[in-house]
Image (cartoon, helix red, strand yellow):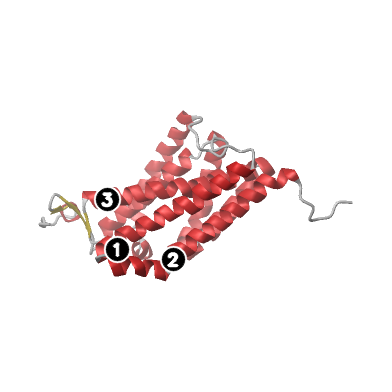
């Protein structure tokens, strides 16, 4: 009779993926919240530059520890390829339809939801007053980099392998549990929101076989929230060619750079 702890070869992919994701995320999380790491940036740069470089560091760390390294571990130790894990453009028309519908809804909701003070206390993560074109581009690039690792971890490694190992509903439950738990530190509202949003992303990912919908809509979510938050932050503004766009939109005057 086999012992309860006897390892079965068919479980290799799920065991490797779940452990790789858990370890990778843990390393990223403790790096990203480290007071020592943050202090290193703020001792060496002016405040605005410190915020920009510190947040960019966090995003690159997310790409590395949530996506690149776990992905390499899984691909080299299982029969899965990156394409099998959702890094592809399969069913592109279906993906674009999902993106269009979800994207419009996200942008609309975010403009109003971003007024919430709890949201304004957290976003944008770069706590800089003047948002020039260059800073907007850097912030956008940082999120674009980050979500490659982020969505590959959640909807690629974790979801796809659990789906093939256990079926849709167990894979969904595992994904939502991990997704919600990792958002607890961001408060009740974001934690609750992970369940409906996570369900939609998991469904779209399995339906299309690609993480494109999850990646693109999450990027839209982050950027629209950031820029709506800048608009609603009284101490922040969009500074374009020496004028304050936010003040103009709010009916105010212009401000020289």
Residue found 37% across the figure and 42% down from its top: 104
Q: Position of residue 169 (x, y in %)?
A: 65, 45
In the image: residue 46, left or right of residue 184: left
Which residue was labeled with disc 2?
33
Proximity of marks 3 and 2: CB atoms separated by less than 8 Å:
no
Say if 212 sits above or below 30 in the image.
above
Q: Quadrant of residue 128?
A: bottom left
How many numbered markers are drawn?
3
Residue found 86% across the figure and 51% down from its top: 2
Counting residues from the start of the chain, the first of labels 1 and 3 encountered is 1
Residue found 45% across the figure and 29% down from its top: 93
Proximity of marks 1 and 3: CB atoms separated by less than 8 Å:
no
In the image: residue 43, left or right of residue 181: left
Counting residues from the start of the chain, the first of labels 3 and 2 encountered is 2
Q: Is residue 199 visible?
A: no
Residue found 45% across the figure and 45% down from its top: 148
Measure the C-alpha gap from mark 1 to mark 3. 16 Å
At numbered mark 1, what does the secondary structure look like: helix, strand or loop?
helix
Sort mark 3 into few (<14), some (14-19) or many (20+) by Cα contacts within 10 Å: some
Q: Position of residue 247 (x, y in %)?
A: 17, 56
Sort mark 1 into few (<14), some (14-19) or many (20+) by Cα contacts within 10 Å: many
- The numbered dot on residue 136 is 3
In the image: residue 217, left or right of residue 252: right
At numbered mark 3, what does the secondary structure look like: helix, strand or loop?
helix
Circle nearer the viewer, 1 or 3: 1
Measure the C-alpha gap from mark 1 to mark 2. 15 Å
Counting residues from the start of the chain, the first of labels 1 and 2 encountered is 2
Circle nearer the viewer, 3 or 2: 2
Which residue was labeled with disc 1?
50
Measure the C-alpha gap from mark 3 to mark 2. 23 Å
């Amino acid at each position: 009779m086999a012992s309860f702890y006897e390892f079965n070869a068919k479980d290799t992919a799920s065991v490797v993926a779940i452990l790789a994701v858990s370890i990778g995320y843990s390393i990223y999380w403790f790096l990203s919240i480290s007071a020592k790491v943050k202090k290193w940036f703020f001792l060496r740069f002016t405040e605005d530059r410190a915020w920009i470089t510190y947040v960019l560091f966090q995003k690159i760390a997310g790409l590395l520890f949530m996506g690149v390294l776990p992905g390499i571990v899984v691909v080299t130790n299982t029969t899965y390829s990156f394409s099998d894990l959702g890094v592809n453009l399969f069913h592109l028309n279906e993906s674009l339809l999902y993106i269009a519908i979800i994207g419009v809804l996200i942008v609309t909701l975010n403009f109003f939801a971003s007024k919430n003070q709890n949201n304004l206390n957290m976003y944008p993560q770069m706590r800089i007053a003047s948002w020039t074109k260059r800073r907007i581009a850097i912030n956008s690039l940082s999120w674009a980099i980050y979500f490659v690792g982020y969505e590959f971890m959640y909807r690629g490694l974790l979801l796809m392998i659990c789906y093939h190992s256990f079926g849709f509903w167990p894979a969904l439950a595992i994904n939502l549990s991990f997704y919600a738990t990792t958002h607890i530190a961001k408060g009740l509202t974001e934690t609750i929101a992970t369940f409906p949003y996570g369900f939609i992303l998991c469904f779209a990912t399995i339906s299309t076989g690609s993480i494109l919908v999850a990646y693109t809509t999450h990027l839209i979510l982050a950027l629209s929230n950031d820029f709506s938050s800048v608009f609603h932050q009284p101490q922040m503004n969009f500074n374009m060619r020496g004028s304050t766009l936010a003040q103009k939109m709010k009916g105010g005057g212009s401000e020289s750079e």
